[in-house]
Amino acid sequence: MRETVHYLLWVIGLTVWTVVCFITPYFMDNPVDGWYSMAVVFAHISACGIGAFLILYAMGCSRYLTAVVLPLWALLGAALAFYRVGYHVTLTTMLIAVTLHTNPEEAMGVLSWQLVLWVAVQMMIACWAVWWRWKRIQLTSAWVHGLIAVVCVGCYIGSSYKLREVILYQRFPLNIVHYGYLYVAGLRPAGTTRTVPSFTIAETTDSLTVVLVIGEATRADHMQMNGYERETTPLLSARKNVIAFPHIFSEQTYTDICLPHMLTRADSAHEEFQYSETSFIRIYQAAGFRTAWLSNQDLGHAYRDYIEESDTMIFANAGKSQYVYSQWLDGELLPLIKEAMPGHPAKALYILHTIGSHWYYNNHVPQNMYHFQPLTTNRVVTNNGTERLVNSYDNTIRYMDYFVDSLISTIEDKRAILIFQSDHGEALGEEGLYLHGHEIPGVQDPACFVWYSDKYAETYPKKIKALVRNKNKRYRTDYLFYSILSAAGIEADGDSPEMNIFR
Ligand SMILES: [Zn+2]
């Protein structure tokens, strides 16, 4: 009995150390106002602490396992906590990908004596705890404790989807297991091939720039250009050659399942195309275009294969996630465009995957562009009230307006076309629902518009006439695959007037 109590005290000590040094840093920037949101943060820290306790309890049953795991625990926990607080980044699949492709000079750039000192101190604590476990704790029935602990860990993690996905997998220590698994699972097995859908080149041109901006959670009905009463798109509304498509329907309401339907031939009747065929990027390459994917989001497993089809991939903000509360701006993509394709080839396709209007809204707008006030102040979405929520949300659209307008300025003298298509919309309290993932109006009505340059209109007058003719028609987001090809004069197998806004 005494030995069990001694062992449990050792585990509790390690848990407190873990919570203070490696878990709480994930919550230090969370916006809270009032007791309720503070209680939510406290509950989340506690939930992570319970998980850490159970894992440490299981690990400590074996002295050998402790000697291996605990120093690693301290090393990774300390390093992640350091970057979480100092650089506002967290572990994501994108961060793993970027880290593994970092050259030594770049790696040295993010090392510092403060990091080395902090990690060294934590490693010393871990080594001391290992010593204590070996010399001072005699656990005779260790396998019984081990069995109990493993069952408890399984039951705890498996007990609730929300607990697992939203709380535990986003923070230490399970974020390492979760994102490590997602990264490895997303590596394409050797020999896996997708077929390129058959296509014909109907019209050719010697130079053309095509830009696809994939919006995030942008609602059609909050766009000034669609008749929304607030000035959310003042710059684009004042521009010529912008045609809005206010009636695009998204059957899916999560990024991961929306994008394959936009980028490949997949639709609800042919889901299999998203696994068996490439995206339109490969067709563009076959038609002589250089292609670049610039991402301000994570490397989602559902669309990672399509990103990797591009000639160039550039990731802005690799360590950001919705669980980090700091600035995460699409504007950071703008200077990367030149970097993506030096010299700008005559035929170029750029895909920009933006963070757009994703929660936490204020993080995605620079502070000097907080136009609509007052703003949300609480990480608990339901505790902000509709007025603050809509203000913060509308600011993200106004910033998108600035971002896309700036982007257009860089290509307006070329033969160029830009399609903005949001993956889905967002709920702002309608039917008591928030964020996305719900099949209700607002969430299923993503914003869409097309801009074209004068040179583009001179080359493709029929396409512009078609855009004007079609702008008030209803399309599903599946239209994008056929339409973006059609924008460059390419006709893919299966193209039809219902799927092509340029026809
Ligand atoms: Zn999305």
Image (spheres, rainbow, N blue to C red):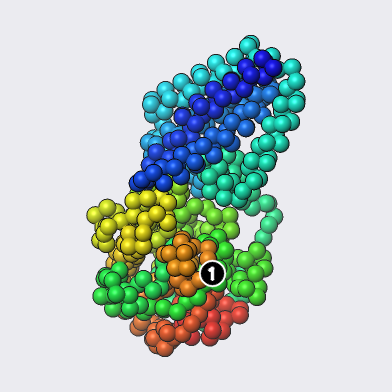
* Residue 13 visible in the displayed image: yes
Where's residue 295, x and y in %? 45, 56
> In the displayed structure, does residue 363 sit left or right of residue 119?
left
Q: Secondary structure beneath disc 1?
A: loop
- The residue positioned 58% from the left and 58% from the top of the image is 302
* Residue 339 visible in the displayed image: no
Instruction: Residue type at mark 1: give it.
Output: Glu
Where's residue 210, x and y in %? 42, 70
> In the displayed structure, does residue 268 sit left or right of residue 417?
right
Residue extending farthest to the front is 35
- The quadrant holding residue 283 is bottom right
Q: Residues within 10 Å of mark 1 (few under 14, many from 20)?
A: some
- The residue positioned 45% from the left and 35% from the top of the image is 24
The residue to which callout 1 is attached is: 439
For label 1, being within 8 Å of ligand 1 is answered no
55 to 322, vertically: above or below? above
- The residue positioned 75% from the left and 26% from the top of the image is 144
- The residue positioned 43% from the left and 35% from the top of the image is 25
144 to 398, vertically: above or below? above
58 to 207, vertically: above or below? above
359 to 471, vertically: above or below? above
Name the quadrant of the N terminus: top right
Front residue of 160 and 223:
160
Where's residue 134, x and y in %? 64, 14
